[in-house]
Image (cartoon, grey):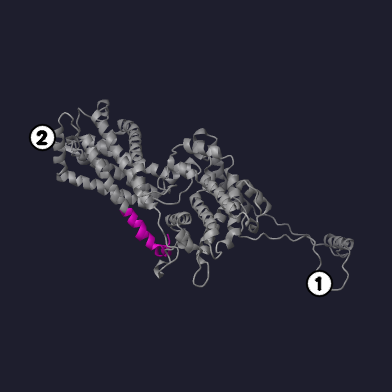
Amino acid sequence: MMSTDLVKYKWFIKGVYYWRTFASIIWSIWYSLPIVVGYQLLCSSNILHPFDWLYGLLEFSVTIRSVAFAVLFYFIMILLVLLYARCCTATTTVYKTRLSTIWSLLRPSRLLAILMFAVLGSVGNWALAVLTGSRFYRQLWDVTDEGLKVMNEKLWFLTFLGGYSGMCFGVAYFIEKENYFVFPIIQQKKIFRLRSMRWTCIRNGLFRSLKSLRLFYPFYFFFGSYPRQFIIKSFNLSLQEDYQLTSLYGMFDISLILQSLVSTAVLFTLWELSLQLFKVFHTETIEFPVIATFAGESSRVITKCLEAKSVPLLQHLGYLDLCQLAQYSKERRKQVFSLSQSGQTAVWTDICSQCVALLTALTIKLGGPDQGKSVPVPTPLLTKPTTGQFQKGWPEPAPTATRRLIRNETAKLWSTTTVPKGIQPVPMKTHQPDPVVEFVKNTYKKVTQLPNKVKGALKRKPFFSYFLTEIPDSSLHELFIDAQLHTWAVKAMSQLIVSSYQEDHYGVAQRSLPVVMSALVNLSQIVDKHAKGTLAISRQSAWHSSGATLQAVLLTGGRHSLKAALHMALHNIASVFVKELVVFQLSEAQQRYLQTVVGTKTNC
């Protein structure tokens, strides 16, 4: 973001984004308290001696060691939410091949984020193991009576498992587009959204834990001796000869398996819960002022938020508030239809121009007509002579004479008999190409075509074709990447126009009816062309493709929501303005399309 934009939208970044992030941190810590207590009760349970169990847990909970590790764990939660705040965005990118998806993870910012996830997972799982109060997980090494430091391989194993789980979470976070803000279809209070997602987070945490254990256990069994020897040499430790996790006896330790499963499940549950809390707070609607009451609010009005392309989250919140305004707030609609002190329609003009420009840009992007450019009128080859060619009052030549004159002039231009006798025509010099220049051009052409040739050759191999072949419907998804904004704009404009039939006392919105209607019809036509034959393929590819989640399905379903919103908007406008459709000045093709969408005959 540029410095000018930082100054312009400083009120949103510091006054809204930072405060909502802070609120999500507080709620994440508050929600994690009962989960951590339940985890401690489960891991230190002793059903045969319940009083000793509760007394020992309470005694350990008030120790300095327990409090210190609890503070460390909650500090990790704070860093995790701050990492979300750094990576989350309201705009996403569609990668057309699997190779481009993998290549996107190699960017320095994402590599650093994945490394941070791994570090936080390692330290977090270590803190969770210590918080159980078990004597097996209190220290990274034990000191024997002889003064030897023996490696506590169980705790090191859980620490490595946490790092691996954090790395897997970071990779899935970017591949499955969990860093993308998905706004809910139905706006609810935060408490209801949190209550509906808690069991989903617990279930997903358990499934992620099982998947990470399924992959990490064989990996540690075959390659765990290398990091173990490195730790032993680095810290001058000794190893228990009778118990090693790289053996079958050590790997099938039931207590270690249960501890690994529960700790990673708790870690994943808390991480996903904090992510959902972060999204809930930042996707909550904001009621922006329609008209600036004070001079300092001029940059906070809704019209300024609609054009905040450098801050995508603010732009999305602006269009969401505009949609809510058009549907549910009669008082704010009056402000939109009102006139300024000078008699200008500034608010409606800005809102209408922003929405129409957004819809027209998508129409042009999809291959539709450009309403903003005038179509040049082609000039004929032979035109009527002007006064410079034939003087005023002179008779115009007949068509046959004109054609004869043109043939004669053409013959004179191209005839070789016009050269006087005795003068030899000078032969034209033929340009001989420089061999060095031709060699350089051919070499450059071959070098530029080499990547395409290599790519084509690799595509014929089954292994490489899996990574280089284009993902089904990826190009279509790229076209409708911002369909959420267009859906809100369509709903807002249609509802405002329908409401203006009774609420617009000054005729503010009626002046823009032809422009808005033409933009809606053009966009609906081109969206229908792209949506034909792709619904079944899109659903199948969305659900059954590698790594598809509900987040991906919501991203790919944007164009269907846009299509439904366009049809509903045209139906509502045509139903209200039945007698006024004649002033819309639609073409015959647009009139026929409007009749098919509305379902009744329109008087256009």
Q: Give the main secondary structure of the magenta stretch.
A: helix
Determine whether, in the image, residue 469 is placed left or right of residue 26.
Answer: right
Q: Which residues are magenta?
A: 1-22
Dividing the picture into quadrants, the one containing residue 511 is bottom right
Q: Is residue 371 above or below residue 295?
A: above
Task: State the residue in front, 265 or 3.
Answer: 265
Task: State the residue in front, 474 or 350.
Answer: 350
Dot 2: element: loop
Q: Which residue is mark 1?
A: 387
Disc 1 residue type? Answer: Thr
Q: Residues within 10 Å of mark 1 (few under 14, many from 20)?
A: few
Residue at the far left in the pictured view: 145
Q: Residue at x 45, y 36 (%)?
A: 546
Q: Is residue 330 above or below residue 232?
A: below
Disc 2 residue type? Answer: Glu
| Image location of residue 558, percent across then percent down | 50, 46
Task: State the residue in front, 113 or 602.
Answer: 602
Q: Residue at x 58, y 39 (%)?
A: 533
* Residue 7 in magenta stretch: yes
* Residue 183 in magenta stretch: no
Question: Can you tell which mark lies on residue 301?
Answer: none
Q: Is residue 255 above or below residue 177?
A: above
Residue 114 appears in the rendering? no
Question: Can you tell which mark lies on residue 146?
Answer: 2
Q: Residues within 10 Å of mark 2 (few under 14, many from 20)?
A: few
Task: State the residue in front, 325 or 455.
Answer: 325
Residue at the far top in the pictured view: 249
Evaluate if marks 2 and 1 touch, with contact meaning CB atoms under 8 Å apart. Answer: no
Quadrant of the frame with the N terminus: bottom left
Quadrant of the frame with the C terminus: bottom right
